[in-house]
Image (tube, grey):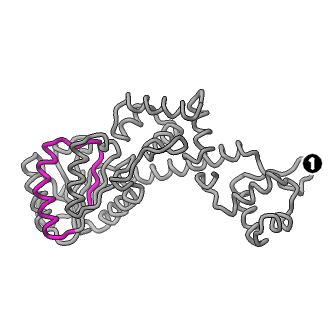
Amino acid sequence: MLSALGLNETTEKVYRGLLAFPGFGVDELSAHLLLPEADVHAALDELADLALLRVSREDPGVRLPVSLQRAMAILLQRQQNELEARRAQLAASREQVTALLTEPTTTPGASGDPIERLLGLDAIQGRLEELMTTATEEVLTLIPGGPQAPATLAAARLLDEDLAVRGLTRRSVYQDSMRADRTNMDYARWTIGLGAQVRTAPLVPPRMIIVDRRIAVLALDPDATARGIAVLREPGVLAGLLALFEQTWSDGTDLDTTEAGGEDDITPTERELLRMLAAGLTDEAAAKRLGVSLRTVKRRMEVLMRRLDAGSRFEAGLKAGQRGWL
Protein backbone atom coordinates (compact mmCIF):
# COMPACT_ATOMS: atom_id res chain seq x y z
CA MET A 1 0.00 0.00 0.00
CA LEU A 2 2.78 2.45 0.88
CA SER A 3 4.50 1.73 -2.43
CA ALA A 4 1.96 4.09 -4.02
CA LEU A 5 3.35 6.81 -1.75
CA GLY A 6 6.97 6.24 -2.67
CA LEU A 7 8.30 3.46 -0.44
CA ASN A 8 9.98 0.51 -2.13
CA GLU A 9 8.95 -3.03 -1.21
CA THR A 10 11.88 -3.72 1.13
CA THR A 11 11.57 -0.44 3.02
CA GLU A 12 7.83 -0.94 3.51
CA LYS A 13 8.46 -4.49 4.75
CA VAL A 14 10.96 -3.22 7.34
CA TYR A 15 8.60 -0.41 8.40
CA ARG A 16 5.73 -2.87 8.91
CA GLY A 17 8.09 -5.20 10.76
CA LEU A 18 8.90 -2.39 13.18
CA LEU A 19 5.20 -1.64 13.63
CA ALA A 20 4.60 -5.28 14.57
CA PHE A 21 7.76 -5.67 16.68
CA PRO A 22 8.90 -2.20 17.86
CA GLY A 23 11.80 -3.56 19.91
CA PHE A 24 13.43 -5.57 17.13
CA GLY A 25 17.00 -4.74 16.13
CA VAL A 26 18.65 -5.21 12.75
CA ASP A 27 19.51 -8.88 13.30
CA GLU A 28 16.02 -9.73 14.54
CA LEU A 29 14.35 -7.88 11.65
CA SER A 30 16.68 -9.62 9.23
CA ALA A 31 15.77 -13.05 10.59
CA HIS A 32 12.04 -12.36 10.87
CA LEU A 33 11.68 -10.72 7.44
CA LEU A 34 14.16 -13.02 5.66
CA LEU A 35 16.16 -10.03 4.45
CA PRO A 36 19.94 -9.49 4.36
CA GLU A 37 21.13 -7.25 7.20
CA ALA A 38 22.58 -4.82 4.65
CA ASP A 39 19.09 -4.37 3.16
CA VAL A 40 17.61 -3.82 6.61
CA HIS A 41 20.26 -1.17 7.38
CA ALA A 42 19.52 0.58 4.07
CA ALA A 43 15.78 0.49 4.73
CA LEU A 44 16.22 1.93 8.23
CA ASP A 45 18.37 4.74 6.82
CA GLU A 46 15.68 5.55 4.27
CA LEU A 47 12.95 5.49 6.91
CA ALA A 48 15.02 7.87 9.04
CA ASP A 49 15.60 10.21 6.08
CA LEU A 50 11.84 10.26 5.47
CA ALA A 51 11.15 11.05 9.15
CA LEU A 52 9.24 7.79 9.54
CA LEU A 53 11.30 6.84 12.60
CA ARG A 54 11.45 8.69 15.91
CA VAL A 55 13.77 8.42 18.91
CA SER A 56 12.26 6.54 21.85
CA ARG A 57 11.62 8.81 24.83
CA GLU A 58 12.29 5.90 27.16
CA ASP A 59 15.47 4.69 25.47
CA PRO A 60 17.24 7.31 23.29
CA GLY A 61 19.24 4.53 21.64
CA VAL A 62 16.11 3.01 20.11
CA ARG A 63 14.31 4.30 17.03
CA LEU A 64 10.60 3.56 16.79
CA PRO A 65 8.31 3.79 13.74
CA VAL A 66 5.78 6.60 13.57
CA SER A 67 2.15 5.51 13.36
CA LEU A 68 0.76 4.33 10.02
CA GLN A 69 -1.51 7.39 9.84
CA ARG A 70 1.42 9.72 10.48
CA ALA A 71 3.56 7.88 7.91
CA MET A 72 0.91 8.25 5.23
CA ALA A 73 0.49 11.95 5.99
CA ILE A 74 4.27 12.49 5.73
CA LEU A 75 4.58 10.55 2.47
CA LEU A 76 1.53 12.25 0.99
CA GLN A 77 2.96 15.67 1.78
CA ARG A 78 6.27 14.62 0.21
CA GLN A 79 4.50 13.58 -2.99
CA GLN A 80 2.61 16.86 -3.05
CA ASN A 81 5.88 18.77 -2.69
CA GLU A 82 7.42 16.77 -5.54
CA LEU A 83 4.35 17.42 -7.69
CA GLU A 84 4.57 21.15 -7.05
CA ALA A 85 8.29 21.10 -7.89
CA ARG A 86 7.54 19.35 -11.17
CA ARG A 87 4.82 21.87 -11.98
CA ALA A 88 7.25 24.68 -11.23
CA GLN A 89 9.77 23.14 -13.64
CA LEU A 90 7.11 22.89 -16.35
CA ALA A 91 6.06 26.48 -15.69
CA ALA A 92 9.67 27.61 -16.04
CA SER A 93 9.95 25.76 -19.36
CA ARG A 94 6.78 27.41 -20.60
CA GLU A 95 8.06 30.83 -19.55
CA GLN A 96 11.25 30.24 -21.53
CA VAL A 97 9.24 29.31 -24.60
CA THR A 98 7.01 32.36 -24.12
CA ALA A 99 10.07 34.59 -23.86
CA LEU A 100 11.38 33.17 -27.12
CA LEU A 101 8.04 33.73 -28.81
CA THR A 102 8.01 37.39 -27.81
CA GLU A 103 11.54 38.12 -29.03
CA PRO A 104 11.55 40.20 -32.23
CA THR A 105 13.00 38.63 -35.37
CA THR A 106 14.68 40.64 -38.11
CA THR A 107 12.84 38.93 -40.98
CA PRO A 108 9.75 37.19 -39.62
CA GLY A 109 8.73 34.15 -41.57
CA ALA A 110 12.03 33.61 -43.32
CA SER A 111 12.99 29.96 -43.50
CA GLY A 112 16.33 30.57 -41.81
CA ASP A 113 14.89 32.17 -38.68
CA PRO A 114 14.69 30.02 -35.53
CA ILE A 115 11.18 31.39 -34.89
CA GLU A 116 8.50 31.94 -37.53
CA ARG A 117 5.12 33.49 -36.67
CA LEU A 118 1.92 33.07 -38.65
CA LEU A 119 -1.38 34.83 -37.99
CA GLY A 120 -4.85 33.90 -39.22
CA LEU A 121 -6.53 30.55 -39.80
CA ASP A 122 -5.71 30.37 -43.50
CA ALA A 123 -2.00 31.07 -42.95
CA ILE A 124 -1.91 28.56 -40.09
CA GLN A 125 -3.65 25.84 -42.10
CA GLY A 126 -1.38 26.43 -45.10
CA ARG A 127 1.81 26.20 -43.01
CA LEU A 128 0.62 23.07 -41.20
CA GLU A 129 -0.19 21.42 -44.53
CA GLU A 130 3.29 22.28 -45.78
CA LEU A 131 4.97 20.88 -42.65
CA MET A 132 2.92 17.68 -42.72
CA THR A 133 3.57 17.19 -46.44
CA THR A 134 7.34 17.59 -46.05
CA ALA A 135 7.59 15.45 -42.88
CA THR A 136 9.65 12.32 -43.47
CA GLU A 137 9.79 10.35 -40.21
CA GLU A 138 7.56 11.30 -37.27
CA VAL A 139 4.81 13.65 -36.08
CA LEU A 140 4.15 14.10 -32.34
CA THR A 141 1.10 16.03 -31.11
CA LEU A 142 -0.22 17.28 -27.77
CA ILE A 143 -3.93 18.15 -27.88
CA PRO A 144 -5.25 19.67 -24.61
CA GLY A 145 -8.59 21.20 -23.78
CA GLY A 146 -11.12 18.42 -24.14
CA PRO A 147 -13.04 17.51 -27.33
CA GLN A 148 -11.93 19.13 -30.60
CA ALA A 149 -14.42 20.97 -32.80
CA PRO A 150 -15.79 19.03 -35.81
CA ALA A 151 -14.26 21.63 -38.16
CA THR A 152 -10.83 21.02 -36.62
CA LEU A 153 -11.19 17.26 -37.12
CA ALA A 154 -12.33 17.74 -40.72
CA ALA A 155 -9.30 19.91 -41.49
CA ALA A 156 -6.97 17.28 -40.05
CA ARG A 157 -8.48 14.25 -41.82
CA LEU A 158 -6.70 14.59 -45.18
CA LEU A 159 -3.38 15.31 -43.46
CA ASP A 160 -3.73 12.23 -41.26
CA GLU A 161 -4.55 10.08 -44.28
CA ASP A 162 -1.50 11.38 -46.14
CA LEU A 163 0.82 10.72 -43.18
CA ALA A 164 -0.54 7.17 -42.91
CA VAL A 165 -0.05 6.47 -46.62
CA ARG A 166 3.57 7.63 -46.37
CA GLY A 167 4.17 5.41 -43.33
CA LEU A 168 5.20 8.08 -40.81
CA THR A 169 5.21 7.37 -37.07
CA ARG A 170 2.40 9.31 -35.40
CA ARG A 171 1.81 9.70 -31.67
CA SER A 172 -0.84 11.94 -30.11
CA VAL A 173 -1.87 12.70 -26.53
CA TYR A 174 -5.36 14.08 -25.92
CA GLN A 175 -6.84 15.21 -22.62
CA ASP A 176 -8.85 12.55 -20.78
CA SER A 177 -12.01 14.66 -21.03
CA MET A 178 -12.22 13.99 -24.79
CA ARG A 179 -13.21 10.39 -23.97
CA ALA A 180 -16.71 11.66 -23.19
CA ASP A 181 -17.20 12.89 -26.79
CA ARG A 182 -18.21 10.21 -29.30
CA THR A 183 -17.15 12.19 -32.38
CA ASN A 184 -13.65 12.73 -31.03
CA MET A 185 -13.34 9.11 -29.91
CA ASP A 186 -14.46 7.86 -33.33
CA TYR A 187 -11.90 10.10 -35.02
CA ALA A 188 -9.09 9.01 -32.70
CA ARG A 189 -9.93 5.33 -33.27
CA TRP A 190 -9.98 6.00 -37.01
CA THR A 191 -6.42 7.34 -36.81
CA ILE A 192 -5.41 4.25 -34.80
CA GLY A 193 -6.82 2.15 -37.63
CA LEU A 194 -4.42 4.02 -39.91
CA GLY A 195 -1.47 3.08 -37.70
CA ALA A 196 -1.33 6.03 -35.29
CA GLN A 197 -0.71 5.66 -31.55
CA VAL A 198 -3.10 7.59 -29.32
CA ARG A 199 -3.16 8.13 -25.58
CA THR A 200 -5.01 10.40 -23.18
CA ALA A 201 -3.77 12.00 -19.97
CA PRO A 202 -5.45 13.95 -17.14
CA LEU A 203 -3.20 16.97 -17.75
CA VAL A 204 -1.84 17.92 -21.17
CA PRO A 205 0.53 20.87 -21.76
CA PRO A 206 -0.38 23.58 -24.32
CA ARG A 207 -1.06 22.36 -27.86
CA MET A 208 2.10 21.40 -29.71
CA ILE A 209 3.17 19.60 -32.88
CA ILE A 210 6.72 18.31 -33.36
CA VAL A 211 7.77 17.29 -36.88
CA ASP A 212 10.75 14.97 -37.40
CA ARG A 213 12.17 16.07 -34.02
CA ARG A 214 13.53 19.24 -35.63
CA ILE A 215 10.53 21.57 -36.01
CA ALA A 216 7.94 22.45 -33.35
CA VAL A 217 4.66 24.32 -33.76
CA LEU A 218 3.08 26.08 -30.76
CA ALA A 219 0.15 28.45 -30.37
CA LEU A 220 1.08 32.08 -29.69
CA ASP A 221 -1.86 32.11 -27.26
CA PRO A 222 -2.53 28.69 -25.67
CA ASP A 223 -6.13 29.71 -24.96
CA ALA A 224 -6.80 30.83 -28.55
CA THR A 225 -4.90 28.74 -31.08
CA ALA A 226 -6.59 30.49 -34.01
CA ARG A 227 -4.84 33.76 -33.17
CA GLY A 228 -1.51 32.53 -34.45
CA ILE A 229 1.26 29.98 -34.25
CA ALA A 230 5.01 29.97 -33.84
CA VAL A 231 7.26 27.56 -35.73
CA LEU A 232 10.51 26.88 -33.86
CA ARG A 233 13.72 25.21 -34.98
CA GLU A 234 16.12 26.05 -32.13
CA PRO A 235 17.73 22.71 -31.06
CA GLY A 236 17.83 23.63 -27.36
CA VAL A 237 14.14 24.53 -27.32
CA LEU A 238 13.27 21.40 -29.33
CA ALA A 239 15.08 19.22 -26.78
CA GLY A 240 12.97 20.65 -23.95
CA LEU A 241 9.72 20.29 -25.90
CA LEU A 242 10.56 16.70 -26.84
CA ALA A 243 11.20 15.89 -23.17
CA LEU A 244 7.85 17.48 -22.28
CA PHE A 245 6.07 15.37 -24.90
CA GLU A 246 7.74 12.14 -23.81
CA GLN A 247 6.85 12.78 -20.15
CA THR A 248 3.22 13.47 -21.09
CA TRP A 249 3.17 10.35 -23.27
CA SER A 250 4.60 8.28 -20.42
CA ASP A 251 1.88 9.61 -18.07
CA GLY A 252 -0.87 8.81 -20.58
CA THR A 253 -3.18 5.82 -21.02
CA ASP A 254 -3.79 4.03 -24.32
CA LEU A 255 -7.06 5.20 -25.84
CA ASP A 256 -8.89 1.88 -25.60
CA THR A 257 -7.80 1.22 -22.02
CA THR A 258 -10.90 1.42 -19.84
CA GLU A 259 -10.70 4.19 -17.25
CA ALA A 260 -13.48 3.06 -14.97
CA GLY A 261 -12.65 0.59 -12.21
CA GLY A 262 -14.20 -1.09 -9.23
CA GLU A 263 -14.73 0.17 -5.72
CA ASP A 264 -11.02 0.07 -4.92
CA ASP A 265 -9.87 1.52 -8.26
CA ILE A 266 -9.46 5.11 -9.37
CA THR A 267 -9.06 6.63 -12.82
CA PRO A 268 -6.01 8.72 -13.76
CA THR A 269 -8.22 11.82 -13.97
CA GLU A 270 -9.66 11.21 -10.50
CA ARG A 271 -6.16 10.68 -9.11
CA GLU A 272 -4.96 13.95 -10.67
CA LEU A 273 -8.02 15.77 -9.33
CA LEU A 274 -7.29 14.55 -5.79
CA ARG A 275 -3.66 15.60 -6.11
CA MET A 276 -4.52 19.07 -7.37
CA LEU A 277 -7.08 19.74 -4.66
CA ALA A 278 -4.72 18.33 -2.01
CA ALA A 279 -2.10 20.77 -3.29
CA GLY A 280 -4.49 23.67 -2.69
CA LEU A 281 -5.89 24.36 -6.16
CA THR A 282 -9.44 25.68 -6.34
CA ASP A 283 -12.20 23.74 -8.09
CA GLU A 284 -12.13 26.36 -10.87
CA ALA A 285 -8.39 25.95 -11.44
CA ALA A 286 -8.68 22.15 -11.39
CA ALA A 287 -11.51 22.25 -13.94
CA LYS A 288 -9.46 24.40 -16.31
CA ARG A 289 -6.41 22.13 -16.09
CA LEU A 290 -8.47 18.99 -16.61
CA GLY A 291 -10.39 20.46 -19.54
CA VAL A 292 -13.78 19.89 -17.91
CA SER A 293 -16.54 22.04 -16.44
CA LEU A 294 -16.65 23.26 -12.84
CA ARG A 295 -19.82 21.20 -12.37
CA THR A 296 -17.95 18.06 -13.46
CA VAL A 297 -15.18 18.68 -10.92
CA LYS A 298 -17.67 19.19 -8.08
CA ARG A 299 -19.63 16.09 -9.08
CA ARG A 300 -16.49 13.94 -9.24
CA MET A 301 -15.35 15.16 -5.83
CA GLU A 302 -18.74 14.34 -4.33
CA VAL A 303 -18.52 10.82 -5.76
CA LEU A 304 -14.95 10.36 -4.50
CA MET A 305 -15.84 11.56 -1.01
CA ARG A 306 -18.75 9.12 -0.87
CA ARG A 307 -16.53 6.26 -2.01
CA LEU A 308 -13.95 7.21 0.62
CA ASP A 309 -16.61 7.78 3.29
CA ALA A 310 -14.91 11.12 4.03
CA GLY A 311 -16.52 14.05 5.78
CA SER A 312 -14.03 16.62 4.46
CA ARG A 313 -11.57 16.99 1.62
CA PHE A 314 -8.66 16.75 4.05
CA GLU A 315 -10.00 13.42 5.31
CA ALA A 316 -10.53 12.34 1.70
CA GLY A 317 -6.86 13.06 0.98
CA LEU A 318 -5.71 10.91 3.90
CA LYS A 319 -8.04 8.04 3.01
CA ALA A 320 -7.03 8.25 -0.64
CA GLY A 321 -3.42 7.87 0.49
CA GLN A 322 -4.35 4.84 2.59
CA ARG A 323 -5.86 3.20 -0.49
CA GLY A 324 -2.80 4.01 -2.59
CA TRP A 325 -4.76 6.42 -4.80
CA LEU A 326 -2.18 9.21 -4.67
Nearer the observer, 111 or 207? 207
Left or right: 59, with 168 as reference point: right
313 falls in the magenta region = no
| Magenta stretch in the rendered image | 140-168
Q: 148 above or below 257?
A: above
Q: Amino acid at mark 1?
A: Glu
The residue that disc 1 covers is 58
Image position of 235 with respect to 48: above or below? below
Residue that protrudes farthest toward the right in the picture: 58
Judged from the image, the secondary structure of the residue bearing numbered disc 1 is: loop
Residue visible at 44% across and 54% down? 89
Describe residue 278's horizontal placement relative to residue 134 as left or right. right
Residue 146 rendering spot, x and y as whole percentages: 29, 42
* Figure quadrant of residue 227: top left
Left of 185 or right of it: where is 8? right
* Dot 1 alpha-carbon crowd within 10 angstroms: few under 14, some 14 to 19, many 20 or more: few
Residue at 44%, 47% in the rendered image: 268
Q: Is residue 257 above or below residue 278?
A: below
The residue shown at (60%, 27%) is 311
Where is residue 113? Give x, y as percent.
Answer: 17, 64
- Residue occupying the point 13% across, 57% down: 128
Question: Looking at the image, which is closer to me, 79 or 37?
Answer: 37
Is residue 233 visible in this depiction of the protein?
Answer: no
